[in-house]
Image (cartoon, rainbow, N blue to C red):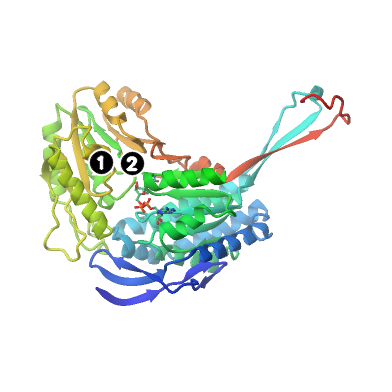
């Protein structure tokens, strides 16, 4: 279905510019399948132009060379501009991927805080001095931090701006400049975001550039470009592995935020009301389309029947509908291919022996072709496909366990290690289990909370490096060690020291 569409251009060097080819990508509202925008299907020549603009901006004295307090002041203006446009950005996000306006409004309302936090880090960024160990202490050695340079960033469709800002805010605070390839499902918000950041936030031209287009063309050209200095990627483990190899070939660092299959573990002492809400939050919020989805629900066998009854009852009550309606609790899957992937995983689960406890169908009272009921599979074993592979949809696999040792072994028996939830009222157990789980983020009696100041990233195949917090800034800085000789003599030229 097609209605009036808005045609966007690429954003390069501080302005909208046409691609050098005419081919375009349609952007659909997954609720009803209407096409509401188009963006250029960019080319390698477009990537060259964007990297060139970012390189000039990096070399120019308008960004990397600013005093930290001056750069911080721009980032604070950027934060104010984002606040000003939070409602508009939330609507763009929802129109692209069907995520709830109630979630996108709060996400966009909080986005400016990333820039304020990293403005603070920018103001306080310091190097250090190293005590001299040779030349009788007559050396003055200091370490300073410098930005890598031009960052090539590639992002997915599920939280388009939030995941961009995890990279953009610290990269800009460090003094880097940025070329961004958003997902082809969600390219519009990044283009408008770049416009707002430059026109109202005061970013100098060339600091943040957006090239839309296919991953295999624009993404590939960007991560393999010989004039970028660092890659930042969020997306699937499969693509991340390839991008990491490309970056390795170019000998540049790559931060990778990848997939997950996170365990959400309920012990007998848990407050079951909270745990049930936490499990719903983990797997049905955002229609299950989050990297940190609690898609493997481990419940102790003593409370399994009671928990499953409550879980099914809560799932039955979830309001599916128009994501633009603030009352809606679950929107559509973001696009039809993902819907088909979800349904085929459900079928595989049943074929391998799982019981379809609830869901699995497209509700017949909703438009479009992307709605899927919240789905609960029980009798799941940890070696089944639905317990090992990331589905990225509203599909919970419920497994049972008999003791702590068993659940730790099962929970860690996964290629992924992004996040985990623990539900228990026993403090010592919570600490023991948190220590033993192989995951970058652990929640105790909560699930799916994040903040600009807390590092986030994966163990094992869930990624490399951390975003947010101090670690998020370090990822865009490299150290330079400067040695000053204070002795005034260079003695033995044939020995180190
Ligand atoms: P994807 O890997 O298919 O695509 C991610 C991005 O990579 C897109 O912009 C895509 O166009 C681009 N791309 C594809 N092939 C490329 C190539 N050869 N070279 C360069 N770029 C290429 O992922 P997706 O379907 O957009 O997103 C869902 C995945 O992202 C899930 O696996 C999810 O777990 C993961 N994710 C991880 C996090 C995290 O923080 N760990 C957050 C959100 C999503």
Secondary structure type for disc 1 = loop
Task: Please state which of residues 19 and 265 is positioned toward the viewer in this rendering.
Answer: 19
Q: Say which quarter of the image contains residue 34.
A: bottom left
Location of residue 480 with respect to 75 vertically, above or below: above
- Count how many numbered circles sit on residues in the image: 2
- Residue 441 lies, in percent from the top left, at 38, 37
Task: Name the residue rendered at 55%, 48% in the picture.
Answer: 230
Image quarter (top left, top right, bottom left or bottom right) of the N terminus: bottom left
- Residue 242 lies, in percent from the top left, at 43, 46
Task: Please state which of residues 354 and 269 is positioned toward the viewer in this rendering.
Answer: 354
Task: Please state which of residues 323 and 117 is positioned toward the viewer in this rendering.
Answer: 323
Residue 311, visible in the rendered structure: no
Q: Residues within 10 Å of mark 1 (few under 14, many from 20)?
A: many
For the residues labelled 1 and 2, the Cα–Cα distance comes to 9 Å
Residue 496, visible in the rendered structure: yes
- Residue 48 lies, in percent from the top left, at 56, 62
Q: Which mark is residue 285?
A: none
Q: Which mark is residue 295?
A: 1
Mark 1 vs 2: CB contact within 8 A:
yes
Task: Name the residue rendered at 58%, 53% in the picture.
Answer: 226
Disc 2: which residue: 260
- Mark 2 Cβ inside 8 Å of ligand 1: yes
Image quarter (top left, top right, bottom left or bottom right) of the C terminus: top right
Task: Name the residue rendered at 54%, 61% in the picture.
Answer: 208
Q: Is residue 456 left or right of residue 132?
A: left
Secondary structure type for disc 2 = loop
């Amino acid at each position: 279905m097609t209605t009036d569409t808005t045609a966007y251009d690429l954003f390069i060097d501080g302005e909208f510019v046409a691609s050098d080819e005419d081919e375009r990508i349609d952007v659909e509202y997954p609720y009803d399948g209407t096409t509401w925008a188009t963006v250029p299907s960019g080319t390698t020549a477009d990537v060259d132009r964007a990297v060139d603009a970012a390189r000039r901006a990096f070399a120019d004295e308008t960004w990397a060379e600013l005093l930290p307090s001056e750069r911080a002041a721009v980032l604070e203006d950027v934060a104010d501009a984002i606040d000003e446009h939070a409602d508009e950005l939330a609507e763009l996000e929802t129109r692209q991927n069907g995520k709830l306006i109630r979630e996108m409004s709060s996400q966009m309302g909080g986005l400016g805080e990333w820039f304020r936090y990293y403005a603070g880090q920018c103001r306080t960024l310091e190097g250090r001095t190293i005590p001299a160990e040779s030349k009788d202490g007559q050396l003055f050695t200091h370490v300073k931090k410098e930005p890598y340079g031009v960052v090539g960033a590639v992002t997915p469709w599920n939280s388009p701006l939030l995941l961009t800002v995890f990279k953009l805010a610290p990269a800009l605070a460090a003094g880097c400049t940025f070329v961004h390839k958003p997902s082809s499902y969600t390219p519009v918000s990044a283009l408008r975001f770049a416009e707002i950041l430059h026109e109202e936030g005061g970013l100098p031209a060339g600091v943040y550039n957006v090239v839309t287009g296919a991953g295999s063309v624009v993404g590939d050209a960007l991560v393999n470009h010989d004039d970028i200095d660092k890659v930042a990627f969020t997306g699937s483990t499969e693509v991340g592995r390839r991008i990491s190899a490309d970056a390795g070939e170019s000998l540049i660092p790559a931060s990778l935020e990848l997939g997950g299959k996170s365990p959400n573990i309920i012990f007998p002492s848990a407050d079951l009301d909270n745990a049930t809400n936490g499990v719903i939050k983990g797997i049905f919020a955002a229609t299950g389309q989050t990297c940190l989805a609690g898609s493997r629900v481990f419940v102790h066998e003593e409370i399994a029947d009671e928990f499953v009854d409550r879980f099914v009852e809560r799932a039955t009550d979830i309001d599916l509908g128009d994501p633009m309606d603030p009352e809606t609790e679950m929107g559509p899957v973001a696009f039809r291919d993902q819907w088909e992937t979800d349904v085929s995983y459900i079928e595989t689960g049943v074929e391998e022996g799982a019981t379809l406890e609830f869901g699995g169908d497209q509700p017949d009272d909703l438009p479009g072709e992307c709605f899927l009921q919240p789905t609960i599979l029980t009798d799941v074993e940890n070696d089944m496909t639905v317990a090992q592979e990331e589905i990225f949809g509203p599909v919970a696999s419920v497994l049972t366990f008999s003791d702590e040792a068993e659940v730790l072994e099962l929970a860690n028996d996964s290629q992924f290690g992004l996040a985990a939830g623990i539900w228990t009222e026993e403090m010592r157990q919570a600490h023991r289990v948190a220590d033993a789980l192989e995951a970058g983020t652990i929640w105790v009696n909560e699930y799916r909370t994040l903040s600009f100041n807390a590092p986030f990233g994966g163990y094992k195949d869930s990624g490399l490096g951390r975003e947010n917090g101090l670690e998020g800034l370090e990822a865009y800085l490299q150290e330079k060690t400067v040695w000053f000789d204070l002795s005034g003599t260079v003695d033995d030229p044939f020995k180190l020291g």
